[in-house]
Image (tube, rainbow, N blue to C red):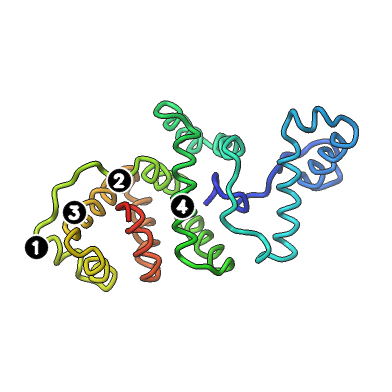
Amino acid sequence: MAGWAATEEPAGGAGGGIASLPAGIARRKEIERIRDTDIDRYFEEKLDRELEGYIRDDLATANPDSVNPVDLLDWQDSRNQLLETTEGRALVDEWQSMAGFKTHLERVQTQARGIVNAVSEDRRAMRVFMQRFDDSMTEAARYAVYAEIADGPPSFVNPVDEDGLKKFGANQVGRELIDEWGPWAAEKVAAAWFRANRLLARMDDADALDFLDWFDDLKPNEAKTIIKSFVGD
């Protein structure tokens, strides 16, 4: 879930300074040199956060379960990551033109973290869930999901009729959700379909198929968690 989770990408990564060393190692050594010789610059350029990222990566490599998979990136670090690609820049521009990038990012981070935490309490299972999401879709498709989360649920939908409830309840996940929603099921199903259709409209055909394949492969509890989050449960 690149762009918002701190354990998703190694912090830093930009090379420079020591040609014989890998870029990440060279960058870390440069930050440590600045820390030791120019402490004002170290904090002004927020190099302390970048160094913390390298330390966190070391901990994750030594013991993956020691690091929370849903630790969140600072909003500026998230923005910088997104700006590295054309698709990411488009998302940044979209959010910035609306209520502001930071506002939208925090909404996505909060909801995405809630989904991952609800899927499992086991950190390894969390990482598997997040990695499967990243591996199953293109960058553009993942950012379409982020954009849909940021948009939030509709303020009003027309409840589905009995045929709509039957269609939604044609599988185990749908039946269980209808039972859980009780008298609100018709509105919740309508909201779920509204958001699914709006999400798929953001994607081209290939990305939409990748997303649907990923969703179809989810475990029942994972699918239920995502649907409930999207309809405001």
Q: How far apart are marks 3 and 2 (CA)?
A: 12 Å
Residue named by callout 3 = 187
Q: Which residue is drawn at the image coordinates 73% and 46% (left, top)?
A: 52
Residue named by callout 1 = 162
Give the quarter of the image for residue 192.
bottom left
Q: Do the residues labelled 3 and 4 touch (CB within 8 Å)?
A: no
Please report whichever mark, 3 or 4, sits nearer to the chain's N-terminal start: 4
Q: Distance between the residues labelled 3 and 4?
A: 23 Å
Q: Which residue is drawn at the image coordinates 47% and 58% (left, top)?
A: 133
Which dot, 3 or 4, sits closer to the camera? Answer: 3
Q: Kindly identify which numbered label has been placed on residue 112.
A: 4
Vertical arrangement, residue 144 with respect to residue 225, above or below = above
Q: Kindly identify which numbered label has been placed on residue 95.
A: none
Residue named by callout 2 = 153
Q: How far apart are marks 3 and 1 (CA)?
A: 12 Å
Please report whichever mark, 4 or 1, sits nearer to the chain's N-terminal start: 4
Q: In this view, does 10 lie to the left or right of 25?
A: left
* Amino acid type shown at disc 3: Glu
